[in-house]
Structures are given as structure tokens and as C-alpha cells.
Image: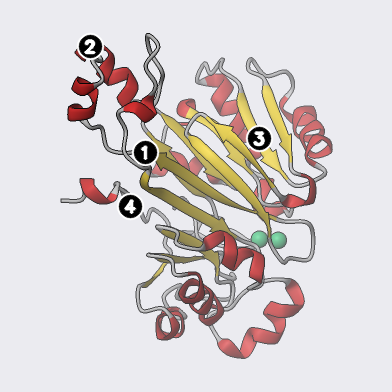
Amino acid sequence: MLGCGGTQPLPGRALAALWLQVGGSALLLDCGEGTQTAARRWGKSLYKLDAILLTHYHGDHILGLPGLLMTQAALGRAAPVTVAGPPGLRQMLAAVRALTGPLPFALRPIELEDCAGQFLVPAGQVTAFPCRHRVACCGYAYTLPRAGRFDPVRARAAGIPVACWRTLQSGQPVDGFTPDMVLGPPRRGLKVVYATDTAPCPAVRRAAAGADLLCMDATYADEADAPKAKLYGHSTCRQAGALAAAAGVRRLWLTHYSAAVEDPAAGLAAAAAAFPAAEAGADGKALTLRFDEDMP
Ligand SMILES: [Zn+2]
Ligand SMILES: [Zn+2]
């Protein structure tokens, strides 16, 4: 988590942004002012950043784009960068380009009609879903699928040369042999869901179902602010906890705290009352997710 703030960055609290790294590829969710500084602070290489997923075009989620792209250029990035977002993406990118001037790499826009759709990025598969905000706003579910277990007994019985095993194990056909000949049923993969800015709603709950990690709008710590949250299309900490519980996620990180929330942990108790595994998001908060059977 590069930042956990909403609306305005504060000294010591960057705007909401999430960095997801899978092998040598990285994915950035939202890019408010100061995101590139936050990435550097937490040791993330912008050179490896292949895709930027924008939830919506409120300034606290996009104003860091021109500077971040120019730094990628300065680092010698030549490979294309995918930029996904709700309708209006091309227009927004035209404004960004007017500020950056020509870039040495291509920007590949994925404009998500109705804030929904599936697409591939180098790090894996992404599914967009509509959030409930004042403007069109996408949430994103990143999934890393996992192939079934390799069965050497079946491979030998089918007369498949050992030299082909590794390729089949990775899910690719080779020399007339196909993965289904040697792999068991697909195993549980990994899923990370990012939903901000949003009020709680069925679309977010469905998209978050069973996630290993949900990062959720928790703009207000005090439940007395619930009417304000509803009016502006945000959630309270308690609402984020309730949604996490209903969606059956494994972990919840609260994020996008209002600048008026002095202590980001203040709403944690309210969230944890509904979902005991809730954690207060914080700048630099990090986690390595592993497939179930790889857990120590
Ligand atoms: Zn926001
Ligand atoms: Zn917003």
C-alpha cells in the first residue's frame, strides 16, 4: 500500500494507491499526486510498472500520472504501459500527454464501458466492476489462477517424455500432448480486490467474494458520518468491515481515509466488530500472498 489517504495528501500520508508485484511485473491501482514519490519511498521500481488501473478521474486518484510517466521515461522504459479506467479515459490521457509531451513508450488504453470487463495484463488477469460513487468508478479484482497438480503416474502411463513435463506443467501443450492429460483440477489461485471510492453495494460485495485481500474505501472512521458517506459515495470503516464479512474475504485493509481522520486506526475497532481480521491500512503496509499449499 503506497498510500492510504483520500482527497488530500498529508505529510506522512500519501494518497490512496496500491502496488501489486508478481514476479518481474508490477501493477499500480490509482495514481494520485505524490504516488511516484511513495513508490520510491517503499522501494518499488517504476521501470517494472506495466499497467496502471485507474478507478475514476477525481484528482486524488490521477494527478500523479504525468510525473510518474515522465519518470518511467527517464528510467529508460520502452515497453508499453497499459492504462485502464472508466469511460472518459482517452480524453483524460490526452490531457496527460499535453503535460508530458512525447513519451518513449506506448500507452495502451483500456476504456471500460459500464465500468465492467475482463482483460489481461502482464501480471495476470483483471476484472473490473462498478463501484457506487458520485461519478463512474471502477473497482478491480486481480486474479492469479493456479493450474492443477501435475500427476507423474498419468504422464508415464501416457508415454509422455520427461522432457515435455515442465511445459505441460506450465499449462502449455507440447508435441501433441495437452495439459489436461497430466494435470488435476485447477487449484485455488489468488485474488486481490481494490474498491475505492465507493459506498457499500452488491456489485462490490460480489466482486470481493472470497478475496485473499480486499482494500476498501473507509473514508470515515466515525459512524456518525454515515449520512455524509452515503451522500458522497464513500464508506465508513464499519461499513467496510460489514462488506468484508458478507463477501467472505480473508483479509481487509481499510484505505482512503479522509484528511479529517487524524488517526487512521481510529475506525479499526468499528470495522473489526463486523470483521475481526480487519486491518488499518497504512502507507508502506505490505504483504506477500502465497498459494495455499506453498504456505509455510
Ligand atoms: Zn478519492
Ligand atoms: Zn472520488
Q: On the image, numbered disc 3 is attached to which residue?
A: 83
For disc 2, the neighbor class at 10 Å (few under 14, some 14 to 19, many from 20) is: few
Label 2 to label 3: alpha-carbon separation: 42 Å
Residue depicted at 68% across the width and 25% down the height = 107
Q: SS of the residue at dot 3?
A: strand
Residue type, numbered disc 1: Gly
Q: SS of the residue at dot 4?
A: loop
Q: SS of the residue at dot 1?
A: loop
**Mark 1 or 2: the one toward you:** 2
Residue 53: name its quadrant.
Answer: top right
Q: Position of residue 177 (x, y in %)?
A: 37, 16
Q: Position of residue 85 (x, y in %)?
A: 71, 44
> Would you place residue 130 above or below residue 245 in this image?
above
Q: On the image, numbered disc 4 is attached to which residue?
A: 287
Residue type, numbered disc 3: Val
Residue 257 is left or right of residue 169, and the answer is right
Q: On the image, numbered disc 1 is attached to which residue?
A: 43
> Would you place residue 224 above or below residue 75 in this image?
below
Q: Earlier in the sequence, mark 1 or mark 3?
A: 1
Query: Is any atom of residue 32 visible in this view?
Result: no
Q: Earlier in the sequence, mark 4 or mark 2?
A: 2
Q: On the image, numbered disc 2 is attached to which residue?
A: 161
**Foreground: 294 or 217?**
294
Q: Earlier in the sequence, mark 4 or mark 1?
A: 1
